[in-house]
Amino acid sequence: MAVVFDKTKGLTDKPFHYCPGCTHGIIHRLVAEVLEELDLVDNAIGVAPVGCAVFCYDYFNCDMHEAAHGRAPAVASGVKRVHPDKTVFTYQGDGDLASIGAAEIIHSAMRGEKFTTIFVNNAIYGMTGGQMAPTTLVGQKATTAPLGRDENHAGMPLRVSEMLATIPKAVFVERVSVHDVKHINQAKKAIKKAFQTQMEGKGFSIVEVLSTCPTNWGKTPVESLKWLQENMMPYFPLGNFRTPEEEK
Amino acid sequence: MAGRVIFDENKCKGCELCTTVCPVKIVVMDKERINVKGYHPATVKEMDKCTACSSCAKICPDVVIKVERL
Ligand SMILES: Cc1ncc(C[n+]2csc(CCOP(=O)(O)OP(=O)(O)O)c2C)c(N)n1
Ligand code: SF4
Ligand code: SF4
Ligand code: SF4
Ligand SMILES: [Mg+2]
C-alpha cells in the first residue's frame, strides 16, 4: 500500500472558510504543495490580501503577513529587501490587485522586485458581495452592474498578465486555470516555475489563476467551472507570456 | 491498478466537484446522511473499481480526500 495523495505539509490543519466549491481552496493547495516540494515551508514569507483570501495567513504553514487592501506588493517588496534570502509571495484577488492595488503591482514589477505573486482572477469582488471588478466580463452581472457590464460605461476588462508582460523586469508571467484536473496540474507547474524564477534571483514573477466564485456568480460549483471555461478563457487566454531568456 | 480513497468527511462541503472527474464514476453524494457541517458528504460506494488516479482529490477545494494505491 502506498499513499499517492495526501494533504501537504504546506497547509495547516485549519479548515478553509471558503464557500462550497470555491476554487480558492484548490489554488491554496497548489501553492502549499509547491512550498513543500521546494523545501520552502520554513523559509517562505507570504503576504495575505484583503478579499476572500484575507485569512490565508491561517492556512499557509509558513510565516505570513497581512497587508492593507491592494498593498501586498508594497509589503512584499519591503519584506524581500530586508530578507533577500527568504522566498516571498503575495496571494491576491482581482479586486485587490487590479483595482485598488493596480499601482502597487505595476511598480513592483517595474522595479523587478524579486517576489512571486499568485493572482486569483474570479472576475468579481467576492468578499464584499459581488461588485464589478476591472476583470468582470462584458455582459456579466454584478451588484454594481445589475444589467451586466456595459463597455460604454465601464470599459473593457483588464488583461493583467498581458499588461504586466510588457514590463521588462516582469520576467515570469503566466495565466493558468483550475477548471479541470489537467489544467490544475498545469497550474501547479507554472506556480513552481514562478517560485524557482524568484529563487534564482531573476526578477518579478506572477501567475494569474482563473478561479470561480459560485456564490456571487449565482451558479453551482459544477456550473461555475463550465462558466469559467466557456466565458473567461476566451477573453483571458491561457499561456506563458514571459519566461527568463535563457530558458526559452 | 487498485486503489482506495478516504474522505475526511466532516470537512466536506458537498460541492460535488469530485463526482464529475472520476474516470470510473464511483464518487457520489451520500443523500442518506449529513455531516457536522450539514452537507450530504461525498462518498464511494464501489471502492473495488478505484484506480487511485487522484483526480477526485486534486479537484477537491477542501482537501477532503486521501488516496492510496493497494
Ligand atoms: C481600503 C479598502 N477599500 C475597500 C475595502 C472593501 N473590500 C474588501 S475586499 C474587496 C474586494 C475583494 O475582491 P477580490 O480582491 O477580487 O477578492 P475575492 O474576494 O474575489 O477573492 C473590497 C473592495 C477594504 N477592505 N479596504
Ligand atoms: S464569495 Fe466567492 S470567492 Fe469568496 S469564498 Fe465564496 S465563492 Fe469563494
Ligand atoms: S482516485 Fe480516481 S478512480 Fe479513485 S475514486 Fe478518485 S477519481 Fe475515482
Ligand atoms: S470535492 Fe471535496 S468538498 Fe466537494 S463534495 Fe467532493 S469531497 Fe466534498
Ligand atoms: Mg475577486
Image (tube, rainbow, N blue to C red):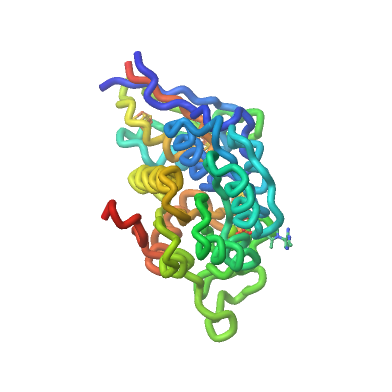
Residue A103, horizontal then vertical, whole percent = 60, 68
Residue A172, horizontal then vertical, whole percent = 40, 56
Q: Is residue A9 left or right of residue A54?
A: left
Residue depicted at x 42% and y 70%:
A166
Residue nearest the viewer, comparing B10 with A16:
A16
Please say if B15 is above or below B40: below
Which image quarter is the C terminus of chain A in?
Answer: bottom left
Residue nearest the viewer, comparing A245 with A41:
A245
Which image quarter is the N terminus of chain A in?
Answer: top left
Please say if A85 is above or below B45: below
Residue A31, horizontal then vertical, whole percent = 49, 41
Please say if A90 is above or below A166: above
Question: What residue occupies the far bottom of the structure in this picture?
Answer: A152
Please say if B6 is above or below B60: above
Residue nearest the viewer, comparing A207 with A248:
A248
Residue B28, horizontal then vertical, whole percent = 44, 34
Whether residue A206 is visible: no
Residue nearest the viewer, comparing B58 with A193:
A193
Whether residue A189 is visible: yes
Residue depicted at x 52% and y 41%:
A87
Q: Is residue A157 left or right of residue A76?
A: left
- Quadrant field for ligand 1: bottom right
**Number of numbered discs overlaid on the protein picture:** 0
Residue depicted at x 55% and y 44%:
A84
